[in-house]
Amino acid sequence: MKTLLLDHDRDGIRDLPLIRDLPAYRAGQIYKWLLSGVGFDGMTDIPKDLRAKLSELYTDIGAKIIKTARSNDGTEKYLYELADGELIEGVLMKYKYGRTLCVSTQVGCRMGCAFCASGRNGLERNLSSGEMLSELLCANARLGSERVGNVVLMGSGEPLDNYENVTKFIRTMSECDLVGQRSVSLSTCGLTDKIRALADDGFSVTLCLSLHSPFDDRRMRVMPTARAYKLADIMSAARYYFEKSGRRVIVEYAMMRGFNTRDEDARELRRLTKNFPCHINLIPLNDTDSGLPGVTGKEAKEFLGKLEALGASVTVRRSLGEDIEGACGQLKRRYTENLHTEDEHGG
Ligand code: SAH
């Protein structure tokens, strides 16, 4: 298969056999086009024969939006097709302070969380940094004069299970003035060695930890990774990240009735998040046919109240795009189900 040209940065492009004997500005021109989401056909200041040669060896567009859904609140869901035909999803959210894009980092996921739709079929493959960039460029292209201001790595995949490509993506976004590190949130189910690596490598993104229960034994019931990564280690890695980066850590907590919203859950969650600046983000569980119960608005408020009474910094995440099935993996699932039905009718 051809390689994606965007997997190279400007210097990488300059060093390619096809480019290195050309005037030095060519690489810069090509890279600039790629970063504005323009394919070989549209690179008007590049000689035609060079464009033809490039397209024989490289792919110009890493991801294409093939389906969109738009919510009444302005949220848009995208189904992207990658060059090899794999499908991933993205969500563009509209906030008062700008646009936030939820980016996928893998096709599928191998973490196997019980409530999450992305990992139902395991991991297909990692996304390359150029493919992740392409997700952002597609969204920017749709926005016209507006730009994505914030990126959350909360689409399909476990970002820290694809460390090299994800960190390259983060670096490129900030080096190219697309989205700065402080406007990037990276969500992980808690791979402690990689959290420490992020700290040691000098990153300053917002680290978000998917906790979902403050007790290891309960957490194991919904998150298989909890067997390998214990809460005490996760919190100490998070503290290390805070100390190195100076960034407050966000704890994500999807509320499930009877499972993680009891008084003792609030107390233990507060205890775990007390020793360094942590903010707790309570998430109403999205229904993904997992059989796990969510909470009502009233129950969410009650649990919020318990944590506030204990002195925690805590908010309930505003739910966007509910009418278009904002939850992870649903657009892809519906699309592939429809494809199969059409196949059956056609065949
Ligand atoms: N692998 C990363 C990113 C996953 S998605 C991680 O585990 O953090 C981002 C967040 O959405 C995670 O906190 C994840 O646990 C949560 N999530 C997944 N499915 C959900 C659902 N059905 N309802 C609410 N939150 C969910």
Image (cartoon, rainbow, N blue to C red):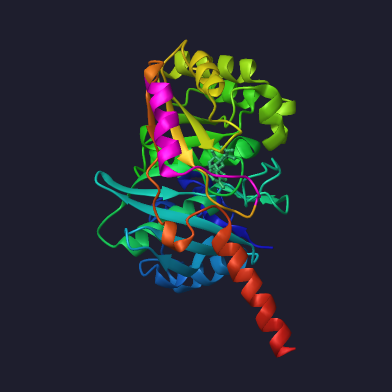
Determine whether 89 is above or below 188 in the image: below
Determine whether 151 is above or below 320 in the image: above
Residue 150 among those drawn in magenta: no
- How far across and how far down the image is residue 20, in percent? 52, 51
As rendered, which of 48 and 337 lies closer to the eye? Answer: 337
- How far across and how far down the image is residue 10, in percent? 46, 47
Q: Looking at the image, can residue 60 be seen?
A: no
- How far across and how far down the image is residue 81, in percent? 57, 65
Range covered by the magenta-colored residues = 290-308
Q: Quadrant of residue 347?
A: bottom right
As rendered, which of 303 and 343 lies closer to the eye? Answer: 303
Q: Residue at x 52, y 53 (%)?
A: 327
Q: Residue at x 44, y 13 (%)?
A: 276
Of all residues, the one furthest to the bottom in this rendering is 346
Q: Residue at x 71, y 24 (%)?
A: 217
Determine whether 128 is above or below 345 in the image: above
Image quadrant holding the N terminus, namely bottom right
Q: Residue at x 63, y 23 (%)?
A: 192
Q: Main secondary structure of the magenta part?
A: helix
